[in-house]
Image (cartoon, rainbow, N blue to C red):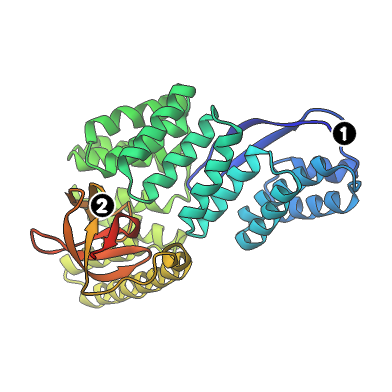
Amino acid sequence: MPSLTLARICREISLGIVIVFVTIGGPAKADEHAAGTCRTAVRDPALRIEACTKAIREVSQEDTVSKAEFLRYRAIARRASGAVDDALIDLDEAIKVQPDHAGAWLIRAAIRQDLGNIDGALSDVEQAQALSPRSPQVWRRRGVLLDEKGEFDRAYAALNRALELNPRYAEAYFDRGDLLRREGYLVEAIDDLTTAIELAPRMAIAWNARGSTWANLDDNQRALADFNQAIDLRPEFADAYVNRGSIRWRLADTERALSDYGRAIELDPANVDAWLNRGRAFEAMGRVDEARHDMEMATALGARQRAAREDAQRTASADNGPAQQGAFYITTRAVNYRLGPSTHANRLGSLASGERVQVVGERQGWLEISVPTGGRGYVWHEFLELEK
């Protein structure tokens, strides 16, 4: 049987992933036009889905390698179109047909991450790693997923390994820099994000992340310059408009700050930060009715998004059973606790292994705890076990 190798796994923007495969051996027994369109990263996902469906239908029964390939490409197109459940079905079948293809496991990991199933995604990454232990793309995905779970040390180590295997891996520099930024290592974050930009100067998310880091360092002019560049590269980048609006507000450039918040809302009407920041700006300006409207929108959208995330991640925490609110738990390792139920929320502090805390709530797989120093914070459920 002809072998199929992972030729390269290329750039991922946000949660997107593009993977290119090369078949070594005989041609696929399918309509050549449909097969060629299926293999091409066309801008129209619907066109690619249609082509892949035709190629799958026409490929010979014996050519399981080509069938698995077309299933993978259709999964990528379905994910791009937002049909992640259908994409997952395609990947399940592709893996069943060709279980020794590391790229298939890696794509499914990305889709499971989309669905909030971080543990399932990590399981897929482990399968990919067993098949391709020196793949920097696999190590990078592992780092991103461990970051999602709040495991800073392990995430950092995985991203380091990705960069050891590929010292010019711009996306891994971005991931490590963004991780460092969120953990408060701002100078180190600037170094990594600058390297990412030097290697991939059109990576808008790296410019945006470095701008946020400059903002945290109170360097408003450098932050503004980076947000401008991010928007020049991606004029539809709503988060960059929010960030630039915040810097403009700091600089007393009021009207252009409001304009940036408004543009972010036009581009992404569900952007909670845009509504919230504009509401606060209106409030500071004494524009009470407009402030009230924006604050109400931010509150409603935030509640809706929290509910959606809780539904998506309910399965991830089901194995441990529901949290016993009011009960005391013991930390299973040294762990950070955060302001909100996300690795992107600010870190409030850390707990040593074996510390005793009281659980007072649960959200999205994160347990809300009453911390020893007073106040509350969130810890990922796997790092706490019920006190015996």
Position of residue 48 relative to residue 363, above or below, is above
SS assignment at label 2: helix
Quarter-of-image position of residue 161: top left
Please indicate, yes or no, whether residue 252 appears anywhere in the rendered image. no
Residue located 48% across and 66% down the image: 315
Residue located 29% across and 38% down the image: 180
For label 1, the crowd category at 10 Å Cα-Cα, with few meaning under 14, some 14 to 19 and many 20 or more, is: few
| Residue labelled with disc 2 | 246
Foreground pick, 11 / 42: 11
Percent coordinates x, y for residue 294 in the rendering:
30, 71
Q: Amino acid at mark 2?
A: Ser
Q: Which mark is residue 27?
A: 1
Position of residue 133 relative to residue 327, above or below, is above
In the picture as drawn, the residue positioned furthest to the front comes out as 388
225 sits left or right of 206 in the view: left
Please indicate, yes or no, whether residue 88 appears anywhere in the rendered image. yes
Q: Which mark is residue 337?
A: none
62 sits left or right of 260 in the view: right
Residue located 48% across and 33% down the image: 202
Position of residue 218 relative to residue 118, above or below, is above
The tag earlier along the polypeptide, 1 or 2, is 1
Q: Assign the C terminus to one quadrant of the image.
A: bottom left
Decide: marks 1, 2 in contact (CB < 8 A)? no
Per the model, the C-alpha gap separating discs 1 and 2 is 54 Å
236 sits left or right of 220 in the view: right
For label 2, the crowd category at 10 Å Cα-Cα, with few meaning under 14, some 14 to 19 and many 20 or more, is: many
199 sits left or right of 275 in the view: right
Percent coordinates x, y for residue 117 in the rendering:
49, 58
Percent coordinates x, y for residue 384 in the rendering:
28, 58
